[in-house]
């Protein structure tokens, strides 16, 4: 069966096409990304602008054409923090849905964390024991821990790399006092959440997902993407500490010259590094292993689990804990 997943994120709109069936690993068939930077189109930080809505509609139209061209039989679409944070986000999606007949679900932060956790569990398997999964997006940081496929705890914090860059930095590179202020802010926010995670026990296997963690691991010496998804990649806290200090002195243009860092993501890499290091430090993680699967794969796996002949998990057949447009 050919499935499509349309991910409307804070930074990109990503269309992923996979060949999948129950009991088998989803095989990527096609991937298309548009760097929409939707969060930058939030007027006064609350309302999605007309230009943002137009660009989102264009990206969705492109995704629908791709789905038709690639023979997609089942298209699932979801939006995350940028639309979730916009006061008019549901209104925008309703207008798009009326024109396209495409249902786009707005995932809660908890749903993001749980679906990402499912993907990580399936990738590493039961032998990993208790997982702790960290995911830094453009608008939020997701944390989840558990020994099963559904985590014991799933938390979302408004500590996305893009959000913090826009809200906290005024220059490129930012002045040292802004870097220190962000560090204090991030550590206080994560510190309040530590107890809700560690009370279930220390993790046997700490794992990180997301583009931010992959780029940080790459500049710290991890294998490039050309070596494929099965190459083991880790990010060590000591290396991350050194790189966070170095990134604070570099401009976005200089960061974009680092291995694995895209020009579009370079401006927010420092904020992402501050969040990543604070999380690893406060959870006392010497290193984390990178997982190539994340939220999109979690959505696909949940969909496969809910197909006829398979019982719904936790009473939820597809994209869990979501709000339809």
Image: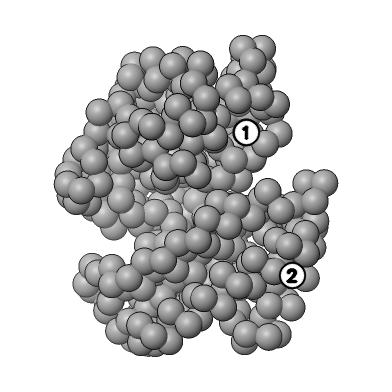
Q: Is residue 97 visible?
A: yes
The colour scheme applied to this rendered structure is one colour
Mark 2 nearby-residue class (10 Å; few <14, some 14–19, many ≥20): many
Q: Residue 161: percent from the left, percent from the top?
A: 56, 37
Pointer 1 local density, CA inside 10 Å: few below 14, some 14–19, many at least 20: many
Residue 104 in the image: state x and y as whole percent. Answer: 60, 73
Q: Quadrant of the N terminus?
A: bottom left
On the rendered structure, is 225 left or right of 211? left
Secondary structure beneath dot 1 equals: helix
Q: Look at 68% across and 85% down and name the residue there.
A: 99
- Relative to 265, residue 184 above or below: above
Provide the residue designation for mark 1: 165
| Pointers 2 and 1 in contact (C-beta within 8 Å) | no
In percent of width and height, residue 205 lies at 29, 37
Residue 286: x %, y % from top left? 32, 22
Is 228 displayed left or right of 159 in the figure? Answer: left
Name above or below for residue 288 compared with residue 37: above
First reached walking from the N terminus: tag 2 or tag 1: 2
* Residue 182 visible in image: no
Residue located beneath label 2 in the image: 92
Q: Quadrant of residue 305?
A: bottom left
> In terms of secondary structure, where does tag 2 sit?
helix
Q: Quadrant of the C terminus?
A: bottom right
| 244 w.r.t. 155: above or below | above
Q: Is residue 190 above or below residue 123?
A: above
Residue that appears at 37% across and 78% down:
3
Q: Which mark is residue 256?
A: none
Please state if 287 lies on the left or on the right of 279 as rendered.
Answer: left
Q: Residue at x 20, y 48 (%)?
A: 226
Residue depicted at 45% across the width and 61% down the height: 33
Q: CA distance from mark 2 to mark 1?
A: 25 Å
Q: Is residue 84 left or right of residue 60?
A: right
């Amino acid at each position: 069966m050919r499935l499509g997943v349309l991910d409307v994120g804070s930074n990109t709109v990503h269309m992923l096409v996979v060949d999948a069936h129950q009991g088998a690993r989803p095989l990527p068939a096609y991937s298309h990304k548009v760097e929409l930077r939707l969060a930058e189109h939030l007027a006064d930080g609350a309302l999605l602008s007309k230009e943002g809505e137009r660009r989102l509609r264009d990206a969705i139209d492109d995704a629908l054409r791709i789905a038709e061209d690639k023979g997609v039989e089942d298209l699932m679409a979801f939006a995350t923090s940028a639309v979730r944070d916009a006061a008019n986000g549901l209104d925008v999606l309703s207008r798009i849905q009326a024109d396209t007949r495409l249902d786009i679900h707005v995932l809660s932060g908890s749903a993001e964390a749980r679906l990402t956790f499912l993907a990580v569990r399936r990738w590493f398997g039961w032998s990993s024991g208790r997982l702790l999964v960290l995911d830094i997006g453009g608008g939020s940081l997701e944390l989840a821990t558990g020994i099963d496929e559904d985590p014991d705890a799933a938390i979302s914090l408004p500590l996305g790399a893009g959000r913090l860059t826009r809200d906290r930095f005024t220059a490129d590179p930012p002045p040292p006092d802004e870097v220190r202020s962000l560090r204090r802010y991030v550590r206080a926010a994560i510190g309040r959440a530590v107890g809700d995670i560690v009370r279930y026990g220390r993790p046997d296997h700490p794992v990180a997902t997301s583009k931010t963690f992959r780029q940080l691991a790459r500049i710290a010496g991890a294998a490039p993407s050309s070596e494929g998804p099965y190459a083991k990649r880790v990010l060590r806290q000591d290396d991350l500490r050194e790189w966070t200090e170095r990134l604070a002195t570099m401009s976005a243009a200089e960061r974009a010259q680092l291995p694995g860092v895209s020009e579009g993501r370079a401006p927010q890499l420092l904020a992402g590094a501050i969040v990543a290091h604070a999380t690893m430090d406060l959870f006392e993680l010497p290193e984390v292993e990178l997982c190539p699967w994340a939220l999109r794969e979690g959505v696909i796996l949940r969909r496969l689990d809910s197909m006829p002949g398979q019982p719904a998990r936790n009473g939820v057949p597809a994209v869990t804990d979501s709000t339809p447009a």
